[in-house]
Image (tube, rainbow, N blue to C red):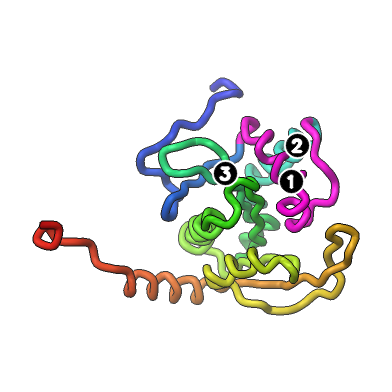
């Protein structure tokens, strides 16, 4: 199999939610990933403090793929359905199959911020985490001043568990960090509620 084989775009992807589908990160994603990481409002608020260059990005990707091979993490590019173009990356970092927990992290292309792509990407990743992998708990850390991200996390069911004082350095200012998490039974309850309240598909009679 050639090293540069790109993954095809499936009409029925294994991991999807709403408008998005997930595929493993590839080297072709690094340019878009570097733009996200090196953006002060995107990468800076996600905890990246050092700019990524091409070589650093390649080493970062090699490390993530190695962890994925060893079941210590899951690292995905998020694409719009019908396309293979990177718009977001989502991860299950620090994956522990023994304790059945992992850390969720997300870094988005700046051009897709604020349009719900990150929320849909989280839903796809959580369905994998709780449904396929069988995790019990998924947690994350977020800058307490990042209100947009916190709204998105709450929307998919994360709740605050604690506050870490002066844990983030953003634009030279120390800010607090929230520890947030969602448990498997909470995820199942939220998805059941969503399925129950979702509008029923239109019948042929209604379409007429």
Residue tagged by mark 2?
57
Residue 4 lies, with reference to residue 163, above or below; the image says above
**Neighbourhood count class around disc 3 (C-alpha, 10 Å): few under 14, some 14–19, many 20 upward:** many
Question: Which one is closest to the eye, mark 2 or mark 1?
Answer: 1
Question: Does residue 53 show up magenta in the picture?
Answer: yes
Q: Nearer the viewer, residue 135 or 176?
A: 176
Image coords of residue 140 (percent x, y):
68, 65
Say the numbered circle drawn on residue 161. Answer: none
Residue farthest along the top direction in this orientation: 2
Residue tagged by mark 1?
37
Image coords of residue 126 (percent x, y):
52, 61
Q: Residue at x 75, y 66 (%)?
A: 143
Secondary-structure class at tag 3: strand
Q: Nearer the viewer, residue 36 or 104?
A: 36
**Neighbourhood count class around disc 1 (C-alpha, 10 Å): few under 14, some 14–19, many 20 upward:** many
Q: Residue at x 66, y 77 (%)?
A: 160
Image coords of residue 8 (percent x, y):
45, 31
Q: Is residue 29 visible?
A: yes
Question: Does residue 186 show up magenta in the picture?
Answer: no
Question: Which image quarter: residue 159?
Answer: bottom right
Say the numbered circle drawn on residue 87. Answer: 3
Image coords of residue 30 (percent x, y):
68, 35
Q: Which residues are magenta?
A: 26-54
Secondary-structure class at tag 2: helix
Residue 137 lies, with reference to residue 36, above or below; the image says below
- Tell whether 166 sits left or right of 13: right
Task: Look at the image and tell me in which quarter the N terminus lies.
Answer: top right
- Could you tell me if the residues under marks 2 and 1 are in contact, i.e. CB atoms within 8 Å? yes
Q: Nearer the viewer, residue 63 or 177?
A: 177
Task: Look at the image and tell me in which quarter the C terminus lies.
Answer: bottom left
């Amino acid at each position: 199999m050639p090293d540069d084989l790109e993954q095809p775009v499936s009409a029925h992807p294994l991991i999807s939610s709403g408008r998005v589908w997930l595929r493993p990160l590839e080297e072709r994603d690094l340019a878009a990933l570097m733009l996200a990481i090196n953006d002060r409002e995107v990468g800076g608020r996600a905890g990246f403090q050092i700019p990524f260059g091409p070589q650093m990005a390649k080493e970062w990707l090699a490390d993530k793929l190695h962890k994925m091979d060893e079941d210590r993490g899951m690292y995905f590019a998020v694409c719009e359905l019908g396309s293979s173009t990177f718009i977001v990356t989502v991860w299950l970092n620090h994956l522990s199959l023994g304790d059945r927990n992992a850390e969720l992290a997300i870094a988005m292309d700046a051009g897709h911020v604020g349009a719900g792509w990150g929320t849909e990407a989280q839903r796809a990743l959580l369905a994998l985490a709780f449904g396929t992998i069988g995790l019990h708990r998924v947690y994350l850390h977020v800058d307490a001043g990042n209100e947009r991200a916190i709204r998105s996390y709450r929307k998919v069911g994360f709740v605050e568990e604690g506050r870490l004082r002066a844990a983030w350095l953003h634009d030279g200012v120390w800010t607090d960090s929230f520890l947030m998490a969602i448990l498997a039974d909470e995820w199942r309850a939220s998805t059941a509620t969503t399925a129950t309240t979702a509008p029923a598909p239109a019948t042929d009679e209604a379409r007429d």
